[in-house]
Amino acid sequence: MASKHVGLFVLFQLLALNVVSQTSAFPTPTPASADDKTVYNRQLTEERPLQEQIAEADSVKAAVQSAESEQNHDDFTMLKSLAEGPKSKETTEVPAKKRDDQYIPDESDSTKSRRLAEDYDSTKNGMDYGKYQDDPESFRQIDGTPLTADAIVQKIANKIYEEDDRGVFDRIVSKLLKLGLITENQADTLEYKVAEALQDLITKNAKNNEIEDVDQEARGAQDDEDSDTNADTWEPPRRRYEEDEDEEDDEIEDEVDRDAEEDGDNIWDRDAEDGNEVSPEDGLQDLQYFPNFYRLLKSLNSEQDTQERETLITIMKTLIDFVKMMVKYGTITPEEGVSYLENLDAMIAMQTKNKLGKPLLPPEFTGPNEKNLDEDDNTKAEAAKMQKEYENLKDSTKEEQPSAETNRPGKSETYLEAIRKNIEWLKKHNKEEGKDDYDLSKLKDFMDQQVDSYIEKGIIAKDEGDTIKRIYSSL
Amino acid sequence: MKHFLAVVFGAALVTLVSAAGTDGAISFEYHRYEELRKALVSVWLQCPTITRIYTIGESFEGRELLVLEMSDNPGTHEPGEPEFKYIANMHGNEAVGRELLIYLAQYLCNQYQQGNETIIDLIHNTRIHLMPSMNPDGFEKAASQVKKQHPGEIKDWFVGRSNAQGVDLNRNFPDLDRIIYINEREGGANNHLLQNMKKAVDENTKLAPETKAVIHWIMDIPFVLSANLHGGDVVANYPYDETRTGSTHEYSASPDDVMFKSLARAYSMYNPVMSDPHRAPCRKNDDDSSFKDGITNGGAWYSVPGGMQDFNYLSSNCFEITLELSCDKFPNEETLKSYWEQNRNSLVNYIEQVHRGVKGFVRDLQGNPISNATVSVEGIDHDITTAKDGDYWRLLAPGNYKVAASAPGYLTVIKKVAVPYSPATRVDFELESLMERKEEEREELMDWWKMMSETLNF
């Protein structure tokens, strides 16, 4: 028992160290969105030095990348030479499209950068990224170094593994076949070899990479596949790959959000399968795991709500990414991450019900949301979001406070508080009695009258009366 | 046995009230005039459908004598709904009552909104008037001087007690006790003794503006039950305050002595300090021999002429008692919360006492209300009158009574009633006017004459 405790203690120490050294995990935004970056960084002061660490890691990885690609260049030269000319164009089509598609979200979705996701997503290492990037070039290496067949196989296997997308293989092979570069036989062999390589990759990663598993599990809440990947072999991925392939082929004019999903995370691909039929709501598949949030979004169907919808979606995704990053870098355990995300949805439901009375957002929602983008405390983010929504519902009662404060702070606050309690009670009371919403205009008129008569009788001072009238007229 | 039952009933009530209540929203501090005003306005803003603020006039220095009214239909007397009032701080330096009424207003509003059924029922069935300060000028004096000194010093015993003119408001009311004592001996009215009230009041130069305002108020609204909050001791004091023989201490019972004792006990029993039989007197040499179960007859304690309590009983239908709530007249602010704790249940329970005895309407045979009809109870030498809608409320202790309703030009009707502790028993009267009876008799006579003439053939 004692040893177990010691063991746990040691493990905890390691984790703590891990946490301390890797509390970064926060995606650094692309230069294109400098504003957000500064805001981000402001929130994450303690992580800034770690970002530098990450930057270092980046450069290291990049160095490795280039080293590897140099080697790969050799291996691929053969293929490259074969694939010169028209081939190159075609072979680059799909991957290029993918890459382009993947790049687009970076500019518009400033809270995420593809580079980051690629870099810090442990299921894709820089090498693979480089490989992926090289894919279009794999058949026409820039450096001109040739690639061996094994390297090709390895590359494809890695690509499939990181993309969780068997379609990669199919695409490549079909292209090769089409161009007559390989025979069917060779295609079969290739497939066999790639399958082997992939299997090795899976088993190897299952053993070696603790964090990776953790990461998988974190997303596993939403994506059982990843955890399954380690256990299963082809089947689940194959199924998904095919569907994904279809999807990806269709997504030439994808919405930004949808692409953002495809871009970074395997998990979202998995969700994409489920959300296939909801193509108008591309990018929301993942959010299906947040039924309440999803409902909230659904309620924003009108045209003018598009902005809010998009903002909401962005925020949600940011939060989710952040949680994933935190899990990945060990800041929180995967269970915590999962439970947080679950709680998030529950909290959305509750806050929506409590504060808004119905799951609709007020028109002024965009404003506070944009601020909320920058909150690193996610529980606060949601709560603050809901709080702001509620306060926006009350509109200028919030605005009233500053102006009234110039006169008599304590009193107007008390009055405001009292009025608020009355409105709350009226709402609740009318609900309980099954009446329609209380008639605000009647109440306003009544209160105005009363206030006037009270001023006349010397019960209320003129400025107090004005304050009260103002508060009521702003409701 | 009755006592035991009352205690049990009371205990249940306490549990109900305390279980339902949280005083989290009340902030326990002293309120100067502005703060008092704001506090009342805040209660009104929070509960505008069940409250109304009004003023019955101005103090000598121009401060409004503010009243917060609470009922389901503020501003209106609903026929059959009894009127109740609390008045505090008529002695400006007796500050606890003033604060308690502010806290009570906040409490009732909060509890109403939180769904406390006892409070909701109370507010729906009573019209409650709260006047935290009858002497705001005196309070300002007392409050400013207390700040400079240590509380408990003898100086604060008097500063701020009287109004700005130096008038002790609780000696300023027309002394109707003397008149009643004469009438007891020589015969005369046993109620509503201030004849030509309005004229008498307006032309009386000795009356302070605060006193006048309250008298007008009493004449305007048909109050049924009331209490007047003081400080300097801890007891519930009931009429009569002035001794019959003029001596300094003498038990001076009113015709409703039984009922008054019951009312005073209804307050004291929920105040743990007041009802503590082993409570030491507030000051070493105090004579509290007249205190029993936390109550005392006024005259038995010490004679008070011209007090507001007796004025209520003798000039109107209103039964009023005097509540002394603290040994210290102007205690430390930190103690206010505990005073609230001691008095909250009593304050609520006392309001509930208004729903006792018999009540109803006096109408004529056509159903029209008869206002100012007299309702008398056999064996109790104190009558009450009906209000504008013919409605009346006669507080009575449990027992069997004969209740009579009479009005000039009408034939008196007597009814037998068995009265429980509570709630009030509804007894309506339909009075036949004398004219109607004459008419009836004439008709009867005519019929008889007709019959006779037919029979006898003339």
Image: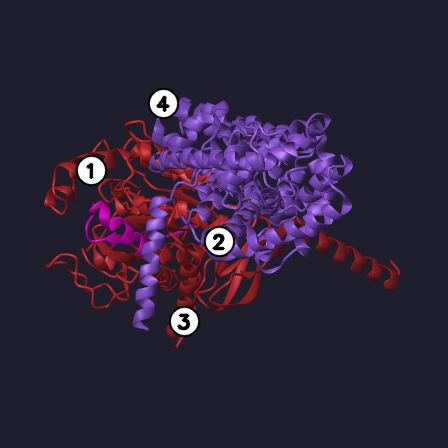
Chain colours: A purple, B red
Q: Residue at x 18, y 55 (%)?
A: B248
The Cα–Cα distance between marks 1 and 2, rounded to whole angstroms, is 72 Å
Quarter residue B136 falls in:
top left
Give the residue type at disc 4.
Asn
Q: Which mark is residue A414?
A: none
* Residue, disc 2: A214
Q: For mark 1, give the secondary structure.
A: helix
Front residue of B434 and A151:
A151
Q: Is there a contact, CB below 8 Å, between mark 4 and mark 3?
A: no
Q: Nearer the viewer, residue B400 or B99?
A: B99
Using the image, tell me which numbered label, if any, was put on residue B142: 1
Q: Position of residue A218 (x, y in %)?
A: 51, 51
Q: Is residue B223 visible to us here?
A: no
Label 4 vs label 1: CA separation?
A: 29 Å
Q: Which residue is mark 3?
A: B8
Q: Which residues are magenta?
A: B317-341
